[in-house]
Image (cartoon, rainbow, N blue to C red):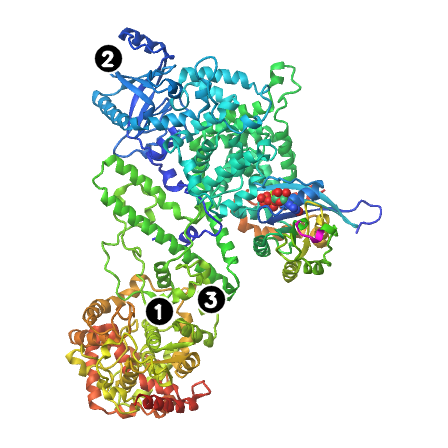
Amino acid sequence: MAEATAPKPSSSVKLVLLGEAAVGKSSLVLRFVNNDFQENKEPTIGAAFLTQKCNLPTRTIKFEIWDTAGQERFASLAPMYYRNAQSALVVYDLTKPTSLIKAKHWVAELQRQASPGIVIALVGNKLDLTNETSSSNPLGEDGDGEAAEGEDADGDARKISTAEAKSYAEEEGLLFFETSAKLGTNVTEVFTAIANAIPETSLKGARGPGASQASAGRTEDQSRVNLTGPRDNASKEGCGC
Amino acid sequence: MFNLSSLVQKAQSLIDPTQALNLSASDRNPAKSTLFRHQFRLPDSQTPLQEITAELTISPPIQYSPNATQGEKDRDRDRGYHYAGKLHLSESYLCFSTQPTSFLQTASTSTSSGFTGQTHGAGPGGNGFTLPLCAIRRVERLHSQSYQFALAITTWNGISNNSANETSKTPAYQQKITIQLAGSRQACERFCDGLKRGLKSGVGDVGKLKRVVAECYSEYLLQGDGKKSGEPPDAGLGMLFRYPGDARKLRDRSKMRLWGEYLRENGRNVTLIRQPTFHKLIRVGLPNRLRGEIWEQTSGSLFLRLEHPTQYAETLAKYEGRDSLAIDEIEKDLNRSLPEYPGFQSEEGIGRLRRVLTAYSWTNEEVGYCQAMNIVVAALLIYMSESQAFFLLSTLCDRLLPGYYSTTMYGTLLDQRVFESLVEKTMPILWEHLVKSDVQLSVVSLPWFLSLYINSMPLVFAFRVLDVFFLEGPKVLFQVGLAILRINGEELLDATDDGAFISVLKGYFSKLDESAHPTSTNAKLRAVTRFQELMVVAFKEFSGITQSSISEQRMKHKDTVLNSIESFAKRTSIRNLGPDSKRLSTDDLGALYDRFYAILYERQMRSQMIQEETERRMKASKARAAEVVNGLGETQSVEKGRVGLGPSPTLMDYDGFREFLAGIARWAITDSPTPPEKDPASDRDKHSYFGNSVRRREVSLSPWGAGNPEPADHEFMQRLFRRWDVDMQNALTLQNVVTGIAHIKGKGDIMGSITYFFELYDDDGDGKVDREGILRISEALLFLSRRGLEGSLTPSTSMTGLSEYEAGNGGQTDGPQGTTNERFLSSVSAFIRRCFEYADPDHPQNQEAPGDSGHTDTPDPSALDVGEDSDEEEDLLDLGPEASPKRGKKSTGLPSNPPASGKQENGNQRSVSKAQAEAANAALDPSKPLHITLPTFRMVVLADELLEQFFESSFPASFRISDKLTPPGPASSSSSLTTFSNIGFNRASAASSQAASIVGSSAAGVVPPGKGLRGVLDNIVTDGMRVAAEVRRRMDEAQKELEKNAVHRPGDDEEDEEEGYDGTHTSSTYGGDAERRSVRSEDRDLLEGADAEAMSIRGQEGVSEVKTSTLSPTTPTSAEPGRARSISTATQKVVEFEQ
Ligand SMILES: Nc1nc2c(ncn2[C@@H]2O[C@H](COP(=O)(O)OP(=O)(O)OP(=O)(O)O)[C@@H](O)[C@H]2O)c(=O)[nH]1
Ligand SMILES: [Mg+2]
């Protein structure tokens, strides 16, 4: 629509991070938002909220990021965070096989319970713990297949091959990345890819369709701890920018 | 009865565990003992034994003066502070509080009245003390004129200080308090007697006391005057890594001085007396080195430690080197706990944190470890020793933050809900705004509560909140939260989304140390920090938020929160059930989930109630007061299994499995329910709420619960259980059950179903089922069909066909017959026969089959002669030496139960008995080890229309999951059976006990365990006559029924019947056999009484004719003709072999 000199249109996108404890969700967000990394990041209690803009050629996306707690018992809180989310980052630790299983559970839950059409990215974090990154050669979404093959070198902490995760992602229609929050590998790429994947329609008028769709699914989650009562989604539009 | 939907929600635990929240029973009508313990922060071992109105007089500490005159003593007493209140005595504590006791009126019982008040377990807010009896050194009865009854209590205050000087036993600061009892003389005497007893038993604990007290910093602080000796006790990591904050700014030194004074005058740790100054000193913030000790004192964890001083060390030692999920989770977070505090970047700090969290996870495995606990414990460890932190953590999890860290985090969610409702009530405009802007309050407030503001506010301020929290209880969290919102109200009203909302609060927390009124001209006002302002708003403006208003709100929201947790758990759990679950519908999965957990939950409740009931009976003689208290305590625990509250059982044992099956399949309900021990008048829906033990008596002691169908216990069920128990843990998970059901129900193809059945009986997995197995299979078939068959069996058509056939062969049949069930019986009998016809002989060496004790004698030659038409049934069925004299009249038959209707009649017995005879003969002959393979089994099944239908539809359909057809109520379904069981079955089993056991362990339901086929037959014969009348009546009924049916359903089976008839040449031989007929009528008589067994015989009588029909060309199986031929050849072979 508006192009050239006119200020790029800007819209808000709600994004939720899910995944097992200590896979690096908060670290990814911290890298994306502050381009920073903390070795001893406190576990997230409940959830944390941050925002960050993402500039695309044609528009600006303002991510409203909900970073959730990873421990299993916090799972029942998750619905109040992914409610109305247009996108989700499901993170696993590629040195921990259980974390991928958990990630799959989250994907399944999102597909069934979250807003229809939610854009989901599967992210294998801690790429720096594998050998192949020592070349500091950020893996594009496409180059992963080969990288996975030659990885049995000693000292490689990788437990989940790129191929395995990637084929799962393809099966489920997810975006897929391997990242390192520590080194910053692929982090902005993930968010940019999500921004690009959000359908234009759900952006126009901020959250028009997205919100109305979501409200249908919400009734179910309303009994969760969150604030209850009918909410006026439209009132949210104003704060997008 | 429980209603299922709520029950359902109670079950489950996929999410993980919690600890007991005890909300329902105890909060609605809290036990007096609970309130008592909460108010005085006492361990659970304590119960309120006595109470009396009293006045407390605290004299300033006096120098020890044993020779003081009475007059001097009186003077001392008058000089001190006076407080009116109530004095309480428990097993090991003497407590006093000026605050009206926290016992609700409703908590009172007949034993004692006068428990009133509104504080609702708010904690030791009032002035007074909580004195362990072992800390009392001496009690003197004062004889003064002014008081009727006064006690002077001398404590062991400062006991550790004279360890060097044991002999003198004279504390440097003797603490003496005087209490005047106000009450009747008897009441006072009684109280004193109780006190005396308590003191005596407390004497032994003085050693413990010394040890515990020695770890308190106050002991060091108050050590003599001048120089201190020895190492100071561990007052946390702060001693090594400095305490957070600027000590000067915190005015730590002057606080310490004030505390020193207070403690000197009012006792320390266990002997501490709360006076108004105490509360004030806490409000202004505790000094670093005393903080841990005062936390311990005010929260009551000190008393826990006193109770088990070595528990921490012992727990660590006991579990040393062991691993657990909790430990994995703890390890993940060790480096992530207050990383900004230097102590937690050191091995020392991390080690302490690891040990405390690990030890706690072992003592409370249900909670294990929850993120946020690491932060809280890290904070505690800055100010206290490991052991102190351990007990304080227990107190937090068990009492102050109930359910917060549980696996469902129920308490956290509930308190968020409560917080929201308080916001709505106290700040309606802000609330309105939040709702409008779709801002989720709990997003910000949840971490406040879960980690006690520790990672929301700068540490120094969070600790000040904690100071008050430990003294005044959970309401403080709410008050502070509300105050935060109130103070930031204006700005929050401008925030229109979560982001803005959160950043307002973030900003606020970062400026807590700044002036609240920076622009004020009033210097004093300018000096007030934002944090001070927060405290004032919290405790002044929101002073109306009390423990009782919070309890009330919790009650109100509890169910909603639990329900949503449970439905979430259910959803998640069903979603994660794996690929097998896809074969079942979502409805079915939901229903399975509900049923599975409902059964686990009910079973748990029942066993608990039974246990309690037993205990109750056992201690019926105990003192009444104690019993009432215990009764209440137990009541609370009843609610425990609820899913939303935390970990509930996830494994179903075999008995649970039986119960589960009985709920979804009619065949799994027993025919011979144990008579109820007492009348089932229990009102189970009330049990969790009532608090009085009288009603409890109504609790049924039946292990299956009143009104539930009692499950059968058949070998088939055991096999099914073992088959489903793929993890070999002798118990089933929901996953196992779903997979199990999915394989039976979800396949929808007959081959799969046949294979499944075959595999159930192929014990060693070698693809062969031996003689024993064949008999067991047939037993199982009869067991499964004894209440009729389900699904698309189209009983109408087959029945009509049969009737028509009968009509056409009037000469041969003289009774109404041919219900599906009967026909099924004949199918089974044909099945056996064919199995043996087709069976492959085993190795000749395996001659003696074990267990055939009835056949030790030389086989009857005729029995060996399995040739087609040659035998008389009596001969065929070798009943062995034990056979009853009537055996000649007996027809052969497999044991089975009658169809549910119980009104069948039958005809065509001749052919049946022949087939039966053959089958039995072959089956019983030990000299012919043989087996069938899956292909044979399949062929045999497919050779029979009914069997085919059974495997195709009725067996899978007999598991009714979510369809509404589920068993008629327990009562109704069994009532039709009871007659049978009562009349015939029990007798049968008694009589058959001597009978040889042919089929070793056929279980109850069809055949009593250990009784063989023949035993049953014997019984039928023996008992038959007695119940002849009954049978006749039923036969009449059956006939009517049949005629009715016949009218409605024109048949088309005639051709089949004819064909089959020709095909096997069996029945014709016996068609006109007079003897057979007489046998048959004999049987009919037998039938009556012997119910199930008798019925089966009848059914079998008709079998072969029906069966033969299945071999006709019209049968769908293409291999039909060939098979018919091969049958005979096979038979031939067997015969040859035998000869
Ligand atoms: N080597 C390496 N470590 C990482 C990386 N990302 C995170 N970590 C470390 O993993 C640990 C957990 O990181 P967090 O970001 O707190 O994990 P989280 O998923 O937010 O954890 P929860 O909040 O408990 O759910 C921290 O110690 C991080 O330093 C990474 O890319 N490489
Ligand atoms: Mg995190």
Three-letter amino acid code at the position of disc 2: His
Where, quadrant-wise, is the C terminus of chain B in this rendering? bottom left
Viewer-nearest of discs 1 and 3: 1
Three-letter amino acid code at the position of disc 3: Ala
Q: Position of residue B459 (x, y in %)?
A: 57, 29
Magenta part of the protein: which range? A129-133
Badge 2 vs badge 1, beta-carbon distance below 8 Å: no
Q: Position of residue B780 (x, y in %)?
A: 34, 72
- The residue identified by callout 2 is B143
Q: Secondary structure at mark 1?
A: helix
Q: Examine the image and state in which quarter residue A6 appears.
A: top right
Image vertical order of residue B99 relative to residue B802, above or below:
above
Is label 2 within 8 A of ligand 1 (CB to nearest ligand atom)?
no
Image vertical order of residue A151 relative to residue B1011, above or below:
above
- Dot 3 or dot 2: first in sequence order is 2
Q: What's the magenta bit mostly, secondary-structure-wise?
A: helix
* Circle 3 crowding by C-alpha within 10 Å: few under 14, some 14–19, many from 20: many
Chain where mark 2 sits? B
Q: Residue B742, which numbered label?
A: 3
- In this orientation, which residue lies closer to the viewer: A67 or B269? B269
The residue located at (50%, 15%) in the rendering is B257
Chain where mark 1 sits? B
- The residue identified by callout 1 is B716
Magenta span includes B480? no
**CA–CA distance in space, label 1 to label 3:** 18 Å
